[in-house]
């Protein structure tokens, strides 16, 4: 639970709007955001390798929007295969705004110049755009991407704290015990 609270503080409370809007566009805002993101984890570890992994994985996920690629790869689990990433690049899910023009252009070209493979691709795309389980509203796609992104952050943070901080649980228990004793010492 503590790891989740530290993640929420670092990723939402301490992140300014400027950092949020620019971290995927430029290296400096992303680096600053990752620094402010990593600082709360000093409450649970002083292990430099764990803190570095938390910082570095956060940087890679946020700077390059890696959650979109994870979503795109998981969406390959369909009977018909997968869509090109260029049609899914905003969230990792099929984006009608990017795919629809391809379908419309193929329809304008006419069937005579279109090979069988392209016709199958266009039929598949058309089915996907009409299928509400594939072509979700934008607000759902955005929220699912946020959930996937947070899941990746929490997973990497947990692994760094669990396996790179050899005494994480022992240190945390000692910290909580010391705070409790300081606050509730009888006679003070």
Image: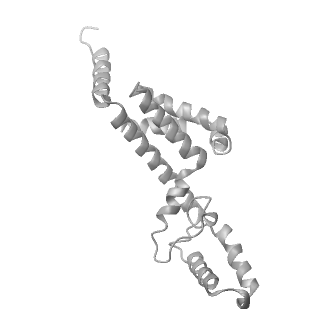
| Residue located at (71% from left, 73% from top) | 101
Q: Describe the colour scheme in one phrase.
A: one colour
Of residue 9 and residue 72, the one placed in the foreground of this image is: 72
Of residue 175 and residue 73, the one placed in the foreground of this image is: 73
Image check: 187 left or right of 82?
left
Percent coordinates x, y for residue 7 in the rendering: 46, 38
Of residue 11 and residue 30, the one placed in the foreground of this image is: 30
Percent coordinates x, y for residue 19 in the rendering: 64, 38
| Residue located at (67% from left, 74% from top) | 100
Residue situated furthest right in the rendering: 108
Q: Is residue 158 above or below residue 102?
A: above
Q: Is residue 130 above or below residue 67?
A: below
Percent coordinates x, y for residue 170 in the rendering: 27, 27
Percent coordinates x, y for residue 56 in the rendering: 51, 37
| Residue located at (31% from left, 30% from top) | 166
Residue situated furthest top in the rendering: 187
Residue situated furthest left in the rendering: 186
**Figure quadrant of the C terminus:** top left
The quadrant in which residue 105 appears is bottom right
Q: Is residue 69 above or below residue 124?
A: above
The quadrant in which residue 180 appears is top left
Residue situated furthest bottom in the rendering: 112
**Figure quadrant of the N terminus:** top left
Image check: 69 left or right of 187?
right
Count of all numbered marks drawn on residues in the image: 0
């Amino acid at each position: 639970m503590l790891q989740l609270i530290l993640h929420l503080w670092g990723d939402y409370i301490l992140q300014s709007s400027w950092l949020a809007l620019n971290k995927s566009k430029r290296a400096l805002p992303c680096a600053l955001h990752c620094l402010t993101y990593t600082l709360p984890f000093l409450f649970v570890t002083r292990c430099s390798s764990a803190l570095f992994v938390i910082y570095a994985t956060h940087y890679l996920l946020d700077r390059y929007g890696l959650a979109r690629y994870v979503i795109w790869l998981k969406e390959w689990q369909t009977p018909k295969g997968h869509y090109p990433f260029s049609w899914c690049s905003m969230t990792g899910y099929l984006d009608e705004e990017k795919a629809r023009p391809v379908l419309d252009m193929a329809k304008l070209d006419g069937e005579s110049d279109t090979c069988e493979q392209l016709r199958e691709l266009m039929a598949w795309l058309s089915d996907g755009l009409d299928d509400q389980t594939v072509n979700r509203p934008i607000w759902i796609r955005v929220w699912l991407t946020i959930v996937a992104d947070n899941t990746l952050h929490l997973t990497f943070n947990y692994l760094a704290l669990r396996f790179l901080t050899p005494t994480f649980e022992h240190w945390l228990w000692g910290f909580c015990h010391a705070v409790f004793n300081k606050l509730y010492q009888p006679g003070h």
